[in-house]
Image (cartoon, grey):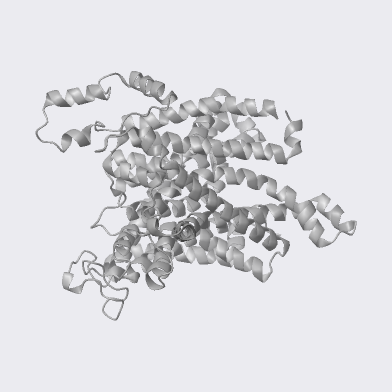
Amino acid sequence: MFYYLIRRLISMIPLLLGITVISFLVIHLAPGAPTGLQTDLNPKITAEARIRLEKIYGLDKPLHTQYLLWLKRLVVLDLGNSFSMDGRPVTDKIIERVPITILINALSMFLIILIAIPIGVISASYQDSFFDKFTTVFVFIGFAVPTFWLALLLMILFGVNLGWLPISGLKSLNYEYLPAVGMLMDRVKHLILPIFVSAFGGLAGLSRYTRSNMLEVIRQDYIMTARSKGLKERAVIFKHALRNALLPVITILGLSVPGLIGGSVIFETIFAIPGMGQLFYMSVMARDYPVIMGILVIGAVLTLMGNLIADISYALADPRIKIAK
Amino acid sequence: MERETPGRLFWRRFRSNRLAITGAMIVILLFLFAALAPYISPYDPGYINTKNALQVPGRDHLLGTDQLGRDVLSRMIWGSRISLLVGFVAVGIAIVIGTFLGALAGFYGKWVDNVIMRFVDIMLCFPTFFLILAVIAILEPNIWNIMIVIGLTSWMGVTRLVRAEFLSLKERDFVRAASATGAKNPRIIFLHILPNALSPIWVSATLGVAAAILTESALSFLGIGVQPPTPSWGNILTAGKDNIEIAWWLSLYPGLAILITVLGYNLLGEGIRDAIDPRLKT
C-alpha cells in the first residue's frame, strides 16, 4: 500500500507541471496584454507608464523566463496580487473562498451517492419493472436538463411562489440576531437549493452507471453459483453482487470532481454564493489574470486530488490491486 | 438466402428502437425550425416595442414577450439556429483534433502515444468550464470564439476512443496486407483503418452536439456566450433571471427548448450506438 501511494504521488508530478504550463499558456498566448484592462481604460496613460506597468508584472521578459518566475513563486503558493481594486494577494482571495465551494460539492457528492446508488441497484435488480422504466426516463431527462435552468425554476417555485426558501446568498440579513439554532436553520435553508442543483446532473450519470455495472455483475458466473446454492435473492444482490458492482463507481466519483468544480461557477453565480466559482466568474468578467491563473491551477489540482483519493479508496476496497504491485 | 448489408442491418435495428426514432424526429424537427426560421417565426425577433414589454403568454404572443417587448417564440425559433451552429461547428473541431491525435497515438504507439496521452490526461484535469471561461476572458465573447473554445476543450474523449480503435485495428490482417503491399503510413491510417473506426466517432459526435449545446447555453446565460441582441436560448434565460419575480415564461420555455434538444441528440446518439453494436447496450 505504501509503495503504491508513493508511486502514485510521483506519477502526479509531470501532470502538475503540465497543469501549470497550460494554465500559464492559456493566459499568455492570447492576443492583448494582460495589463490591457488597466491601460486601455485610462486614456491619459502614457507609453512610458505602460512600459513601467509591464515591468512590474514582468511582461517585458521572454515567455519561458516569465513562466519560470511564475512557477518559482507558485511553489511557495505566491500567486501574485489581484488586478482588482483591492490588489490583495491572490492566494488569500482564493483560500477564503475554497471552503464553501468544497463544502457544497462534498455535500452534493454525498447526496448523489445516497440517492443514485440505491436507484441504480434497485432498477438493475428488477430490470424492466415499472421502477426501472421510470428511472430510465428520469436519467435521460436528468442528462438533458441545463442545471442553471433547473436552478431558475426552483427559485421561481420555492423562492418566489411558495416563499419557502431564500434564493440568494449564504445568510439572511438578520442572521447576526438569530439564536444559534436559527443560525443553523438559516444556513441550511440557504444551502438546500444550491446543493440540490449541483447534485442533479451527477444523479443521472451515477445511477445509470451503477445500474449498468450491476447488470454486468449479475450475469457473472459467481452470481449464478450463489443463486444455485440456494441463497436468498436479497443475499445474492447485497452480499455478492453489490460489492463488485460498486468498485468501479469509486473511480467514476473521482472522475466527476472536475465537473462538479466547474459547475460551481454556474450555481454560485446564480445563487450569489461567495465561493471559488463566483470569484472565478467575477475575475473573468474583470480580466483579473492573476486570479484566473490561480484558480485554473487550483481547480486542476483539486481534480488531481479527487482522482488520487478515488485510486487509494479503490486500492483499499479491492484486494486484487495489491497483488498487482 | 440474401445476406443483409451492414447498412440495412443498422437501419432495421435503429427503426425498431422507439427511443432512437423519437430522438431522430426531434433532431429533424429542430433542423426544420432553424431552416424555416424566417418563414415560421410570427414576429421579427429583434423588433423592440417597450409598450409591449413582459406580456403574459396569450393569443398575440404565444410564449409572451421579453423586457423589451420582443416576441419570445420568434426569438426562440431564431435561437435554434445558434444552437445548431454551435453544436455542429464545436463538435466538428473536437472530432477533427480528437481523431487526428487519437490516430497518431494508436498507430505509432511508443513515445508519440505517450506524449499525446499524457497531454490528454493533463487536459482532463482541468474543469472544462474553468478552461473555457479563462479563454473567453481573453478573447472577445462572440459566437465564433465560443464554438472554437468549446471545440478546443472537448476533443479528449474522442482521442481516447479513436486511439483504442486504432490499437486493435492495426493488428488486423487487412492492415498488415496493406502495409505488405507497400502502402505508406498516411494511406494506411486514413484509407484503411479510419473508415473502420468511424462508428464510435459518429456516436460520440452526436452526444457531443448535445454537450456543446448545453455548454453554449450556460455561457450565454452567464453573459459570456452569444451576445444580445442575437437571440440564443441561453441569453433569453438571462432575461428570465433578471425578471424572475414577474416573468416565469422567460425562464420556462427557452430551458424547455434546450432540454428537448439535448434529449433528442442523446436519444439519437444512444440509438445509433445500439444499432451499430447491440452488445454495448446498457
Name of the residue lying farthest toward the bottom:
B59
Task: Say which residue appears at 50% left-offset and 63% top-offset.
Answer: B23
Task: Say which residue appears at 45% left-offset and 46% top-offset.
Answer: A101
Q: Please provide percent x and percent y for residue B90.
A: 39, 47
Task: Say which residue appears at 68% left-offset and 25% top-offset.
Answer: A3
Question: Along the line of sight, which residue is nearer the eye, B28 or A294?
Answer: A294
Give the side of residue A57 with respect to residue B170, left or right: left
Give the side of residue A65 with respect to residue A204, left or right: left
> Does B252 appear above or below B216?
below
Q: Please provide percent x and percent y for residue B203.
A: 53, 51
> Does B57 appear above or below A32?
below
The picture quadrant where one finds residue A152 is: bottom left
Task: For the C terminus of chain A, give its image quadrant.
Answer: top right
Q: Please provide percent x and percent y for residue B63.
A: 32, 73
Q: Please provide percent x and percent y for residue B282.
A: 64, 56
Give the side of residue A312 with respect to residue B82, left or right: right
Question: Along the line of sight, which residue is nearer the eye, B145 or B14?
Answer: B145
